[in-house]
Structures are given as structure tokens and as C-alpha cells.
């Protein structure tokens, strides 16, 4: 095992390899690594920010939801009130309508009755007159009354 | 190795596995292996160089391809794997080294992956590649784990050592570096020789410990694999599998230690006292 010129050859090869590595191997690789690290860092910060945004949005959404629920409850309550009111109004209206119809009906019935009564009276009069006529026809002879008739004729 | 090969004794087998393929010039001609016994310093371990450079090129090729197609969006599986390494090295560097330097992170990445790959050659069964090379290419010696070659580990650690000295001088200036060597740990002129001795030893110990640690671990591991390969065939699986599994740890750990210590040494070089 003796030292010889191999040592020089190895030293030259070493120097060349280191130079080559320094010039052509190390820079592109370390640049790629560092750039990727930066990319990953950016990505992580963005993800973190997005997470925060999401949290914020969720909080906002739940708040809005709560608000909406309150509003909805208000609206429902109002609607219920309004509904009750409408029903009440309708009831009152119906009541008045009913009483109106009833009074109208009563009036009509009254009028009808009056008319019928009137008619009846006329008929009764006619009947009475007819009856009276018949009675009178039978009981009174023409001679007894001829002086009246004659009188009438003379008056004409 | 089987008992049939009677020519091959155990020690010869081990010796064979621990011998590099050598190349040198003898009288202006290219010569190999035994002919290079007298070539002295100008001998090249072509197997170590081939595998180490090959693995380095493989590493850079794969990482370069991934780097060219790197997307900042959703990465593919290969890109994920490569980015894991980059991220790991980058974190290690940033934890330890607080200055600003364009060199240190790619340097650490190269060291870690390259040494890991070279160490990982240890997990290939010891006879596969040498035997294949012998049968197919007629290569008599082949050592496939580059980090079991002292030249390779010293090649790395001495480069790191020069970087330490370079950055020490660049950041602190020559006078600052000299002061660091002479006025520590005892800040008095009387102690200058003592300080200089201590600091020089600790400075020189850095590359030596760095390379010997890696070499020793891998050499020992390789040797144990070779020894297991000498056992009867029916015991080999029972022994080499646990050792290989344990070795995965050593491989990764040694690559990591080399990288980490390099970062530490260089960050110490960058620090102004």
C-alpha cells in the first residue's frame, strides 16, 4: 500500500467534480427546493386565511340565520294576528249581512202578507157583493124596484 | 474460492484481492502490474481511478439530469430522492457552517454521495467483478472499492486540507493564519514554538485522520468480506449477509463523517478568532 500518482488523479477528479457540482448540479436543485418551499408556505398561509374566512362566514351565516328566524317568528305572529283580525271582521260582516238579510226577508214577508190581505179583502168584497147580489136578486122583484129604476132612467 | 484451486493458497487469495491494477511507464512504454514494481511515485492505480471517477460521473450525471428537469411543482420519485439528499446536506451545512460560501454545500454533497457510492462497491460480493474482469478481459488484478485505496482517501482529504489552508488565508489573511498557528492556545510570545508545534500537528492531523478513518473502516470491512469468502461455501451466506447489513451502516456513516468533518474543518477555517 504505497502512495503514488493515483492520489493526484483522485484530487483532480475531486476538484473537477466539486466544480461541476457547484456549477451545474447544486443551483437548479436548491432553487427548485426553495421555490417549492415558498409555494408551500404561500399555500399554507392561504389555507389558514381561507379557514379564518370560512369561520367568519359561518359565524355571519349563523347570525343571519338567527336574525332570520326572529324575523320569521315576527312575521308569523303578525300574520296570525292579521288572520284573527280578518276572521273577526268577516264574522262581524257576516253578522250584519245576516241581520240585513233577515230584516229584508221579514219586510218582504210583511209586504207579501199585506198584499195577500189586500187581495183577500178585495175578493171578500167581490164575494160579498156577489152574495149580496144573489141575495138581492132573489128577494127583490123587479116590480118593487121598478120605480127606482125608472127614477134612475129618468135621471139619466 | 473452492478447494480445487490448490495453487491458490489463502494468503495468496487475500493478497490477490488486495492488490490494485497498476499502470506506469517503463522506458517510455506503458506497463502494467508487476512491471511497475520499480516505478515509484508515478504509478497509477487504474482500477481505483476507474471506479472512483466512474462513480463520480454516475453521481453527477444523475443529479445533473434531475437538476435540468427539476420542477417546482410536484416532483417525481427520482427528484424526491435527489432532493432529500440535497436537503439533508444543506441542513447539515447550515447547522454547522454560518458563513456564506458558494462552495461548501456542493462540496459537501459531492463528498457525501461520492464516498457513499465508492463505499457501496464493498457490498458487491468480493469475487464478482474481479473474476468477471479476469475471465472476460484478462485483467489479472482488480480492486473494486476505491476507498480501500489509501491514495483515494488521501486524494480527498488532502484536497480538503488545501481548502482549509486556502480559506484560512483568504478569510484571515496570511498574518491571521500565522497568528492562529503561533499564538494559540497560549497567547504569549514565549510559547510561540510550543504553540506552533501544537497547532501544526493538529492542522496536519486533520487530513490524516480524515483519510485514515475512511480507509481503515473500509479496508477492514473489505478484508472481512475476503476472509468470509475463504470459508466453506455453506457458511458464507450466514456470515456475509449479517456483515453486509451491518456494513450498510458503516458505509453511510463513514460518508457522513467525512462530509461532516469537512464542513466542520472548513467552518473553523472561516472563523476569525
Image (cartoon, grey):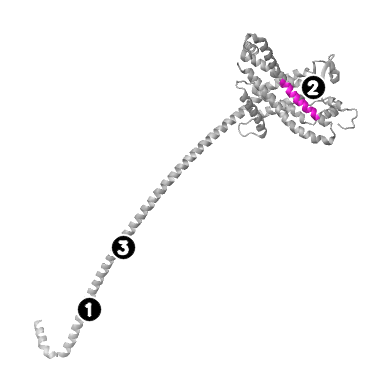
Position above or below: B254 against A132: above
Q: Residues within 10 Å of mark 1 (few under 14, many from 20)?
A: few
Report the mark closest to the observer, 3 or 1.
3
From the viewer's perspective, is A154 left or right of B28? left
What x and y, as percent, mark residue B122? Answer: 77, 29
The chain that hosts pointer 3 is A
Q: For residue B56, which quarter of the picture?
A: top right
The residues colored magenta run B209-225
Q: What is the count of numbered marks?
A: 3
**Vertical arrangement, residue B73 with respect to residue B24, above or below:** below
Q: Under tag 3, what secondary structure? A: helix
Residue A33 picture quarter: top right
Q: Which mark is residue A94?
A: 3
- Could you confirm whether marks 2 and 1 are on the same chain? no
Q: Nearer the viewer, residue A39 or A51?
A: A51
Residue B174 in the figure: left or right of residue B14: left
- Provide the residue designation for mark 1: A120
Q: Which residue is mark 2?
A: B46
Label 2's element? helix
Q: Is residue B62 visible?
A: yes
Which chain letter goes with mark 1? A
Magenta stretch: includes residue A90: no
Instruction: Work out which quarter of the rendered image holds the C terminus of chain A and state it.
Output: bottom left
Mark 1 falls on what kind of element? Answer: helix
Amino acid at each position: 500500500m504505497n502512495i503514488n500518482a493515483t492520489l493526484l488523479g483522485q484530487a483532480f477528479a475531486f476538484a473537477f467534480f466539486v466544480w461541476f457540482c457547484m456549477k451545474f448540479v447544486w443551483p437548479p436543485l436548491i432553487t427548485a427546493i426553495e421555490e417549492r418551499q415558498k409555494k408551500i408556505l404561500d399555500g399554507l398561509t392561504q389555507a389558514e386565511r381561507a379557514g379564518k374566512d370560512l369561520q367568519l362566514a359561518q359565524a355571519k351565516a349563523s347570525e343571519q340565520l338567527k336574525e332570520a328566524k326572529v324575523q320569521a317568528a315576527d312575521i308569523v305572529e303578525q300574520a296570525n294576528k292579521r288572520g284573527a283580525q280578518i276572521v273577526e271582521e268577516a264574522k262581524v260582516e257576516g253578522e250584519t249581512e245576516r241581520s240585513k238579510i233577515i230584516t229584508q226577508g221579514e219586510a218582504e214577508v210583511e209586504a207579501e202578507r199585506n198584499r195577500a190581505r189586500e187581495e183577500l179583502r178585495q175578493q171578500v168584497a167581490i164575494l160579498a157583493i156577489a152574495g149580496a147580489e144573489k141575495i138581492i136578486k132573489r128577494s127583490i122583484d123587479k116590480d118593487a124596484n121598478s120605480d127606482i129604476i125608472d127614477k134612475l132612467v129618468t135621471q139619466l | 474460492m473452492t478447494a480445487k484451486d490448490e495453487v491458490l493458497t489463502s494468503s495468496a487469495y487475500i493478497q490477490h484481492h488486495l492488490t490494485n491494477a497498476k499502470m506506469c511507464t517503463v522506458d517510455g512504454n506503458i506497463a502494467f502490474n508487476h512491471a511497475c514494481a520499480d516505478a515509484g511515485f508515478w504509478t497509477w492505480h487504474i482500477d481505483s481511478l476507474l471506479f472512483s471517477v466512474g462513480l463520480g460521473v454516475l453521481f453527477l450525471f444523475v443529479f445533473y439530469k434531475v437538476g435540468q428537469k427539476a420542477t417546482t411543482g410536484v416532483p417525481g420519485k427520482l427528484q424526491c430522492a435527489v432532493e432529500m439528499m440535497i436537503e439533508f446536506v444543506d441542513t447539515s451545512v447550515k447547522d454547522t457552517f454560518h458563513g456564506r460560501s458558494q462552495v461548501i454545500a456542493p462540496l459537501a454533497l459531492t463528498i457525501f454521495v461520492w464516498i457513499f457510492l465508492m463505499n457501496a462497491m464493498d457490498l458487491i460480493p468480493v469475487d464478482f467483478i474481479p473474476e468477471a474482469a479476469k475471465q472476460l478481459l484478462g485483467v489479472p488484478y482488480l480492486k473494486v472499492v476505491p476507498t480501500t485505496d489509501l491514495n483515494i482517501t488521501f486524494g480527498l482529504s488532502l484536497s480538503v486540507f488545501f481548502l482549509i489552508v486556502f480559506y484560512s488565508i483568504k478569510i484571515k489573511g496570511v498574518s491571521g493564519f500565522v497568528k492562529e498557528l503561533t499564538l494559540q492556545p497560549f497567547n504569549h510570545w514565549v510559547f510561540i514554538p510550543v504553540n506552533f508545534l501544537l497547532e501544526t500537528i493538529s492542522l496536519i492531523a486533520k487530513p490524516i485522520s480524515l483519510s485514515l478513518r475512511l480507509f481503515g473502516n473500509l479496508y477492514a470491512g473489505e478484508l472481512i468480506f475476503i476472509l468470509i469468502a475463504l470459508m466453506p461455501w455453506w457458511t458464507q451466506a450466514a456470515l456475509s449477509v449479517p456483515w453486509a447489513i451491518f456494513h450498510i451502516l458503516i458505509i453511510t456513516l463513514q460518508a457522513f463523517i467525512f462530509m461532516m468533518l469537512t464542513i466542520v474543518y472548513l467552518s473553523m477555517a472561516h472563523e476569525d478568532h
